[in-house]
Image: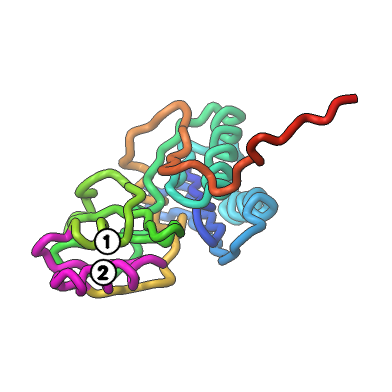
Amino acid sequence: MNVLAFDTCFDACSVAAGRGLRSLSPSIFSLFEPMQSGQAERLMPMIEEAMAATGMKVADLDVVAITSGPGTFTGTRITTAAARALALYADTPLVTVSALQLMAMSPDANATGADILAIATDARRGEVYFEAFDPHTLVSLGPPQALTVEAAAASFGSRLAAVAGSGAQAVVEAANGLGITARAVAPRLLPDAFDLLFLAMELPRQVTVQPLYLRPPDAKPPSGAALART
C-alpha cells in the first residue's frame, strides 16, 4: 500500500511517505521540522521531497492520511485544505486521526505504570486541548475537548495519569492540588506524521474531511467598524 501522511496542527510540519507498506521491501521517508509559522510555505515542498524519495507520484497513492485537529486555526486549515486538494487530484480516499491521538502514539509519551495517558496541549486562555487514552491500547477514552486546566485535571478522578504535551505541567500541577497523582512527560511533544503511516492502513476511509475546531479562532474582525463609502 502507498500512503502519504502529514500534519501541521501545532508548532511543526511533518510529512511521511510509504511505498509498498505491506510488501517485504517497503520504501519509507519522513521529514519533521519544528516551526511556529511557515507551514503553508513548507508543506508542499516537503511532500514533494518525500514522494520523490520513495519513488512515488500523487497518482500512485492509495490513501492520504492526516490529522484533522485540534490545533491552531491556521495549521489545522492548512492540513485539511492540502488533503482535500490531493485527494481530489488523485481520486484518493482520506483517513484522519486527531492530532492528540497521533501524539499519544509517540514513544516519547511514556505512560509506564499509569492508568491513563492524557495529551494536553496549551490552548491559551487557561485552557488545554485534551484527550485521554488507555495507555495499553491507545484507545481514546473520549473525544478531543477544549477544557480548562482544572477540568482536565479533575477528569482523572482517582486514576494515576501520565500527561504529555505543552499543557502537561499545568494540568499535573492542578491535579496534584486536587490530591490526584499525575506526572508530566514529554512537555515538548508534537505530532509526527511518521507515526501515522502504518495506522493509516487500518483506519476507515472517507471521501472528504472537515477540520476539527474545538473553539473559534482567536483573531476576529473588528466589531462595529463602518465600511468606507466611495
Q: Which residue is mark 1?
A: 150
Question: Residue at (23%, 46%) from the top-left corner?
Answer: 142
Pick the residue in front: 2 or 137.
137
Q: Which element is circle 1 on?
A: helix
Kind of residue at disc 2: Ala
Question: Residue at (46%, 45%) from the top-left corner?
Answer: 66
Question: Residue at (46%, 32%) from the top-left corner?
Answer: 209
Pick the residue in front: 161 or 15.
161
* Residue 40 in view here: yes
In percent of width and height, residue 213 lies at 45, 41
**CA gap, disc 1 and disc 2:** 6 Å
Q: Which residue is mark 2?
A: 174
Pointer 2: residues within 10 angstroms few (<14), some, or many (20+)? some
> What segment is highlighted magenta in the picture?
156-182
Label 1 or label 2, whichever comes before in sequence order: 1
Q: Which element is circle 2 on?
A: helix
Pick the residue in front: 121 or 47.
121
In the displayed structure, 141 sits above or below 86; it is below
